[in-house]
């Protein structure tokens, strides 16, 4: 891998669960070659309590995570981005800005664990499934030979990662 540091933004509806989980995972497994951020279309007032619990239980620190609006990353003086991944259909359907850095973008649809219903154990299971899916996709992503691929090839690979589903 090259010495380049890739800046990656994850977008979801409220930036209280999925996108924060993806940010935490990539900042750990992709360090020092990737720096992740997350934002929402309609940001929540805070991190979802079950997200905080899951991240803490799996060794991630949720203390630095807080919901942000995607506009914060589209301003002219914002960090140049290399990748932007939408995780919710709502975020994918938004008229998003022209991001600084003209990043590669892809939609990695991911079920919203906050919307899960049922018993507490069923909700916890939904959060664990979302985390496992994001972790699997991100492990594939960080192992792409990005330095040796052209933009079209990278786009094809990240689109394919977003279409992949876990084996049952």
Image (cartoon, helix red, strand yellow):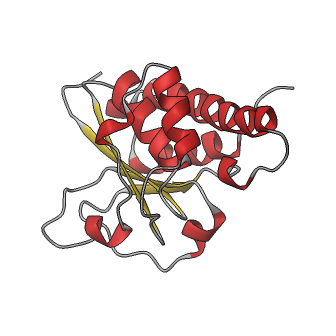
Residue furthest out toward the bottom: 95
Identify which residue is drawn at 27% across, 28% down: 33
62 or 143, which lies in front? 62
Asked whether the viewer can see residue 157, the reply is no
Q: Quadrant of residue 59?
A: top left
18 or 46, which lies in front? 46
| 22 relative position to 102: left or right | right
Asked whether the viewer can see residue 80, the reply is yes
Identify which residue is drawn at 36% across, 67% down: 69
Report x, y in % for residue 134: 58, 35
Q: Quadrant of residue 27?
A: top left
Look at the picture and state if 106 lies above or below 1. Answer: below
Report x, y in % for residue 73: 28, 64
Report x, y in % for residue 111: 71, 50
Identify which residue is drawn at 48% across, 72% down: 42
- Give the number of callouts: 0
| 46 relative position to 102: left or right | right
Q: Quadrant of the C terminus?
A: top right
Look at the picture and state if 127 lies above or below 98. Answer: above
Residue furthest out toward the left: 77
Q: Quadrant of the N terminus?
A: top left
115 or 80, which lies in front? 115
Report x, y in % for residue 142: 43, 28
Identify which residue is drawn at 21% across, 73% down: 75
């Amino acid at each position: 891998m090259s010495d380049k540091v890739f800046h990656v933004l994850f977008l979801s509806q409220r930036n209280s669960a999925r996108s924060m989980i993806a940010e935490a995972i990539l900042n750990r497994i992709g360090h020092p070659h990737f720096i992740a951020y997350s934002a929402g279309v309609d940001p929540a007032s805070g991190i979802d309590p079950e997200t905080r619990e899951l991240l803490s239980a799996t060794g991630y620190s949720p203390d630095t995570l807080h919901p942000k609006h995607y506009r914060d990353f589209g301003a002219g003086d914002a960090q140049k981005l290399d990748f932007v991944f939408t995780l919710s259909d709502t975020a994918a359907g938004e008229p998003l800005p022209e991001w600084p850095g003209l990043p590669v973008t892809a939609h990695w649809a991911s079920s919203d664990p906050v919307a899960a219903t049922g018993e507490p154990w069923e909700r916890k299971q939904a959060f664990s499934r979302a985390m496992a899916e994001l972790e699997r996709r991100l492990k594939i992503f960080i192992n792409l030979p990005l330095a040796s691929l052209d933009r079209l090839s990278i786009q094809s690979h990240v689109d394919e990662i977003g279409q992949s589903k876990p084996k049952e």
